[in-house]
Image (cartoon, coloured by chain):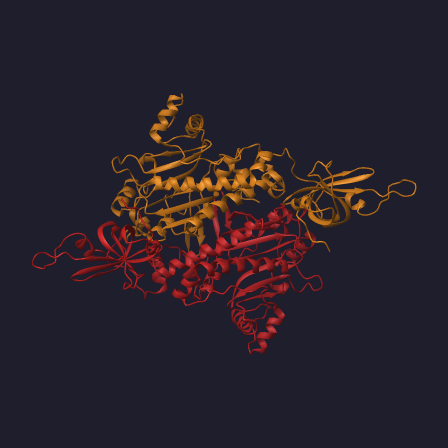
Chain colours: A orange, B red
């Protein structure tokens, strides 16, 4: 028996017997010859089966011809045949002349989704939607991107954490928390690993990272929000300011984009018509107050009562940065203390602003980072100022009572990076199985 | 300003000015000289401060002497001083003669745990417990082990998945499920990514892996169970039997153990008195029925009414394998259909046994793997036989109605591997923050 060859490896083989396995993409059942485009996880190849004719020149109903005629799209098959290189074949310059065809699993002939189905309908049938080479590529890119980040972390002696997602109490606020029945009591799903990655600093771990799920009971239906998402987190000790965090962050992005461009750049260009650009460092850094002035001078007044930016403001400042620096990324820094969590450190000279940043990529926020307040008296005072009861976060505050280094870090939404990298309209496109207020299936 | 040097990098430096940051491990405040052992994420170093004496030979209360006298264990400091190589210094043959000492964060003098504290008490103060070099090493080993697995997967073209942990319905059974309030409805926490990793097979992803949390509302208090644990999962297409899964599995274990031995073997020997052994392949494979006979011949009758093994039986068969093959691992294969889930494929010639296995490491089960039943009629019949209502798993069954390749995979508990690798008595020791029926904090 010839063992299975991945389709992408066929073109490097000499003409001769091969076996491939995959699913049926299209069948052209012509009078004298049958063509099947077969797809596997690595590519697509044309199978060809000239019909047998009898002495009178009539087509004979033999095998595999009869089986081919009955193939529904999506049917998984294993075939054997003779590989032949032929420049005239548009699909990769090769084809396989069929010898045998074995149906492993026949598909129902009526496919529930088509190329023009709505996103929602495609999500209902996500396993079929993901057979599309474009959708498949998204997850190969995600794999490459993540592995590049992890390799950077490992090479720099970071420790990988798996922090618990079940918590006894709220991590940051009681809002947007999912409640879980937990034996005789209740638990909550972690909105972020924030407290636990800070705990690692107090534990003397030095530098840590985690890639894992986070949960927000956020009832919004925007293209950027999900109730469950993959959060990319890192935290480092002994920093002088949030600038150290930004340096780590931009180095990670460079590692990720370099790997994606090298491994998938051509495919991304072909399937998404997008050029993957490896960003130069340092990324532009603009204090938020200055960014708001810039946006204003471009004719856009951020319509908010608080000191925050809004999505349109982020798009405007990104446009400015693209024009001025030719850069897809920008760090907006020094957010007002009024709109940042209690654990963000404030500037020494001006407590009204924090040592924090948002990272904007192609006009949308993908991450928040900061130096953390590690001085227990200051931290406790800031918690009280934000209306938190120190008793409710006693366990967290303990991390700062037995010694802790200065530290900081960031959390980044993985799907947002992919969405913006591939110019997709929604994180639904780049999430394996999206979860939203009205979607828990499949 | 001299920039921070990691303690492990000091010995390679020439004598001269250095700066190190870390936490105070011990202080010996002698009359004429003070010694501090300082620890950071990479090691420990001795700081020395000869006391200043006045013209009468009396000790002067100057700095940093006064600060050193007041240092509580766990206080985080940054120091500068002169590095000096001196063979007589037991701790690495180097010491730092102190120039300046800056307290970054003072610890409360009373440390709530000691070396002889109970495991439960240590877990209450996990961030202090983790400062112990032994505890720290566990998570560096975990990092290395995981990265070796991931590198193997990446090099073999696997796609990394992040499957949702929020599900609309039970994945396998309604038992041991945590229920989550989800807007106007309910959701459940995934017990495993089983259904979603099989979905990737139907989606044509070929080979996938995931490392992520899984949740079991299991009220047991054994040393091997947790309500939340990190599950290592992989699933591959186009297999002929569960043997293909076992081959993948043993290759992954070899990759992981090779990396751990190379990077941490000496430390493991020093701190745990354990020799890390890279297992040889193929791992021994013993059908379960045969294993039970072997155990019986050793004088142990498995006290169960069903066809399963029990923990003592697993220890016995592991002892047999250690004696006979000198191997720490054994695959027990072909479990009875009666004790396996409906989606395990059964043997062609004997439907009473499944194409499945458990992997036993040092006497304890760490993983279950199997070829999956991909033929929809057979799968549906097996579900019904197990008392499942096909309507309740309709979405899952759909994955098999539109074509699917043969496939199989495994799920493995990460903490169990570490526990058994380091000869620890409980997974609590090797879990960053353990979750059990009565533990949700810190």
Q: With A317 as the anchor, is A33 left or right in this view? A: right
- Dividing the image into 4 quarters, which one contains the C terminus of chain A? top right
Q: With A85 as the anchor, is B248 left or right in this view? A: left
Q: Is residue B206 above or below residue B72?
A: above
- Residue A212: tell me if it is visible: no
Q: With A194 as the anchor, is A63 left or right in this view? A: right
Q: Nearer the viewer, residue A56 or B118?
A: A56
Spot the residue most to the left: B56
- Residue A267: tell me if it is visible: yes
Instruction: Please report the residue visible at 41 percent of the width from the left and 41 percent of the height from the top.
Output: A249
Provide residue A385's location: percent of width, then percent of height: 28, 40
Q: Based on the displayed image, in which of its 4 quarters is residue A94 positioned?
A: top right
Q: Based on the displayed image, in which of its 4 quarters is residue B141 positioned?
A: bottom left
Provide residue B440's location: percent of width, then percent of height: 40, 55
Instruction: Please report the residue visible at 27 percent of the width from the left and 64 percent of the height from the top.
Output: B88
- Dividing the image into 4 quarters, which one contains the N terminus of chain A? bottom right
Q: Nearer the viewer, residue A102 or A12?
A: A12
Spot the residue most to the right: A56
Q: Is residue A389 above or below residue B289?
A: above
Instruction: Please report the residue visible at 56 percent of the width from the left and 53 percent of the height from the top.
Output: B234
Total marks shown come to: 0
Provide residue A154's location: percent of width, then percent of height: 44, 50
Provide residue B30's location: percent of width, then percent of height: 18, 62
Q: Nearer the viewer, residue A207 or A72?
A: A207
């Amino acid at each position: 028996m010839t063992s299975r060859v991945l389709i992408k490896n066929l073109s490097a083989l000499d003409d001769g017997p091969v076996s491939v396995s995959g699913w049926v993409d299209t069948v052209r059942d012509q009078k004298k010859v049958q063509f099947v485009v077969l797809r596997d996880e690595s590519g697509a190849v044309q199978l060809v089966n000239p019909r047998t004719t009898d002495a009178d020149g009539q087509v004979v109903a033999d095998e595999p011809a009869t089986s081919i005629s009955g193939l529904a799209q999506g049917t998984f098959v294993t075939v054997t045949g003779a590989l032949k290189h032929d420049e005239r074949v548009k699909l990769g310059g090769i084809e396989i002349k069929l010898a045998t065809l074995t149906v492993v699993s026949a598909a129902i002939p009526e496919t529930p989704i088509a190329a023009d189905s709505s996103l929602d309908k495609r999500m209902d049938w996500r396993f079929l939607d993901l057979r599309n080479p474009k959708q498949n590529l998204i997850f190969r890119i995600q794999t490459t991107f993540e592995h590049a980040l992890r390799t950077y972390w490992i090479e720099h002696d970071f420790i990988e954490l798996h922090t618990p997602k079940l918590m006894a109490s709220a991590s940051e606020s009681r809002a947007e928390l999912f409640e879980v029945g937990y034996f005789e009591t209740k638990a909550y799903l972690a909105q972020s690993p924030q407290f636990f990655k800070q705990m690692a600093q107090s534990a003397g771990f030095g530098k840590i990272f985690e890639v894992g799920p986070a949960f927000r009971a956020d009832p919004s239906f925007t293209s950027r929000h999900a109730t469950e998402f993959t959060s990319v987190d890192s935290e480092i000790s002994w920093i002088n300011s949030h600038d150290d965090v930004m340096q780590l962050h931009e180095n990670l992005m460079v590692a990720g984009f370099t790997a994606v461009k090298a491994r998938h750049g051509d495919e991304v260009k072909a399937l998404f018509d997008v050029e993957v650009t490896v960003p130069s460092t340092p990324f532009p850094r603009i204090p938020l107050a200055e960014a708001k002035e810039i946006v204003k001078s471009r004719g856009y007044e951020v319509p908010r009562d608080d000191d925050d930016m809004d999505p349109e403001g982020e798009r405007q400042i990104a446009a400015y940065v693209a024009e001025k620096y030719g850069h897809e990324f920008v760090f907006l820094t020094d957010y007002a203390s009024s709109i940042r969590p209690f654990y963000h450190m404030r500037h020494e000279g001006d407590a009204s602003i924090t040592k924090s940043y948002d990272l904007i990529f192609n006009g949308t926020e993908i991450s928040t980072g900061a130096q953390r307040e590690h001085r227990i008296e200051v931290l406790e005072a800031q918690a009280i100022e934000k209306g938190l009861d120190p008793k409710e976060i006693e366990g967290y505050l303990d991390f700062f009572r037995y010694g802790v280094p200065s530290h900081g870090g960031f959390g980044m939404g993985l799907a947002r990076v992919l969405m913006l990298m591939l110019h997709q309209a929604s994180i639904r496109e780049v999430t394996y199985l999206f979860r939203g207020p009205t979607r828990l299936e499949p």
